[in-house]
Amino acid sequence: MSCLHRIGLYALLFISQALYAQHNDIIAIKNALPRITDSANYADALNRLSTLYLPRQLDSSGIYAKRAKELSERISYNKGQRDALRGMGRYYALRPHRYLSYLFYDNALTACRAAGDSAGVAVALMNIGTFYQYQQKHEEAQRYINRALKVTWDMRLDSLRAWVLASYYLINESDSVALPVAQKGLRQAISLAHRYHDELGILYTRLFAANEQLRAGEIKKAEENLKSVIAAADSAGLNYIAMYASLQLTGYRIWQQQPDSLQYQRQSVSYAVAGGYAGLMLPVITSLYNRSLRSGNSPRAAGYSRLALGVMMQQQEDMQAGEADYLSYAFGDEWLDSLQQQNQSQKQQLAVNKAANHFWYYQLLIIAAIAILLVVLVTYFVRAYRLSRKNTASMAALQEEIRLGNNALRDSDDFKNKLISMIAHDFRTPLHNIVNITGFIDEKSLTVREAANMISEVEHTAAGTLVIFEEILRWIRTQLSGFVYRPKIFRLEEMISHTVKNLQHLVTGKEIRIVVDIPANTTVAADYEMLQFIHRNFLHNAIKFSPDQGAITVKATRKDGWLTVAFTDEGSGIDAAMLPHLFNWNRNAVEGERAGKGAGLALIICKDFIDKMNGKIHAENNADEGSTFYYQLPE
């Protein structure tokens, strides 16, 4: 990006609450300052002075912006803080310390959005857009400038839109696709500046109009236009505009290979020095220095060398006063490249004419400054590395804590789902039988005796179901805050007898013989409801798949510290393909023919309950017929 284009981007910073920067206004406000007693009004006056000085004298503009910022923060004056943030952003942009300027612009944008300050939002968006254009991030620049244009259009901020349109032109004038729209925007900006009598805006847009005249081949008109701008800016004390116009005219004269181009280039440097903008002109100063060396004009070269050194020292002081983040960012800036080139040039000149120009002193000073920079940079990166390691460890611990919490929530949710499935499984069959019996009665297809027997069976089934329900409900209440396994000692034979009693109507219906082979006084350490759910499920499945007048054997044995309880039926057995997946979540296993509707899910819950009680569960086909389901629990 050319030096001229950069300075053109910076000129867009002159927009403020009012755009008529007159010398008499500065004198009037400075004279009124001692008489202002209200702190908020005093902060507004300081911000106004910062704005008026910006195109005239940069150091004064920065001083007033800093004073306004400190006062506004001290009295918690939000409007003053917003204006001061923009003032600080403009000041650092012209130093130039671009990253610091971006930080202030971004803070100003946030503050203006929070306060509903539409004009402030538009200005901040425009300034950030010019920052991204300087960084050669054209798409980002376009995005911000388009947002700024939308704000000015929606809120009817016509006088402000003139400056935003000028910014849009400067961002897009080198883009051949967007150029026609940019030219149209420039014409609108010129019209709006004249409509609102914005003298500064008129001078500024005339600089761009000269570019369009040059593009149209009207070079004489373009040069006369620029000379007129220089004269008007010089008369009004607008050093920045005069500097920019002189530099623009230098480019035109160089393009025409005119010998007086050097005159305008020196003139632009003079305006820069007078206004405190020499930091922007460091490449131009370096060029003039090298040109003076080549022409043998040592006194003039020494003058430019001192000027460049002063600029670099000032930038070093500003950098030390800025944020630590600026060090890493500024280390790759183009001005540092210019510094290194100047340093190399001075080394060469020192070797040729050390005694004449005293470059050894400047050389040592520059080396010391670079050494300080390197020390600070290394210190910063060491601290950043340590902080990064600490943050990484904290993040890992936090992620582990979140993972454990998620697992606990998932386990709790899974357990509650299993409780619901357990209730549904235990009540499905009894309720289904009740519905069937009442259906027969409703159809009036039974005798009085048969109906009486069925009603008696309904009463028995309902009573058993109620007992099971109360037992499960009592157990659920103890588990509402999350499952905690607290085993107790129960007599196994009593538990099996209770389960057989609850399913007696199914046993009687198929005339099945239940053989209980459990040694006397056999006890089991377990959760009662979880183990009874397993008993009911195993026995229910054995009854369901046993032939009429068949036999079911429940047998308990102890071996090697384990209690094994087996349920053996004489049914059709289990499909060999389904057997390995019987207790796992597998659609074929859950929906398979052997398990029956809903039984597959119940077996999965059985395995989960056995796992929670630290036991084992298994199923296998018998050698002759039927199958055996058994579980093992530690004694």
Image (cartoon, rainbow, N blue to C red):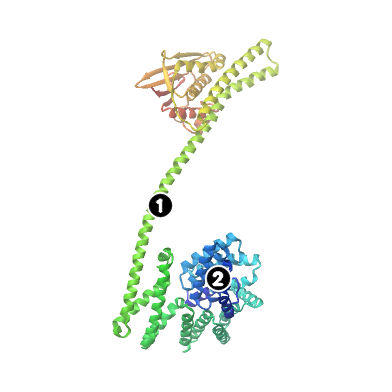
Q: Residue 320 placed where, x, y %?
A: 40, 68
Answer left or right for 420 relative to 303.
right
* Along the viewing direction, whichever of 162 and 504 lies nearer the viewer: 162
Residue occupying the point 66% across, 19% down: 438
Between disc 2 and disc 1, whose residue precedes? Answer: 2
Q: Residue 441 placed where, x, y %?
A: 68, 17
Q: Is residue 176 visible?
A: no
Q: Amino acid at mark 1?
A: Asn
Q: Is residue 71 visible?
A: yes
Which element type, helix, strand or loop, lies under badge 1?
helix
Q: Residues within 10 Å of mark 2 (few under 14, many from 20)?
A: many
Relative to 448, say whether 4 is above or below.
below
Q: Quadrant of residue 342?
A: bottom left
Q: Residue 328 placed where, x, y %?
A: 40, 64
Residue occupying the point 35% across, 22% down: 561
Residue 391, numbered circle = 1
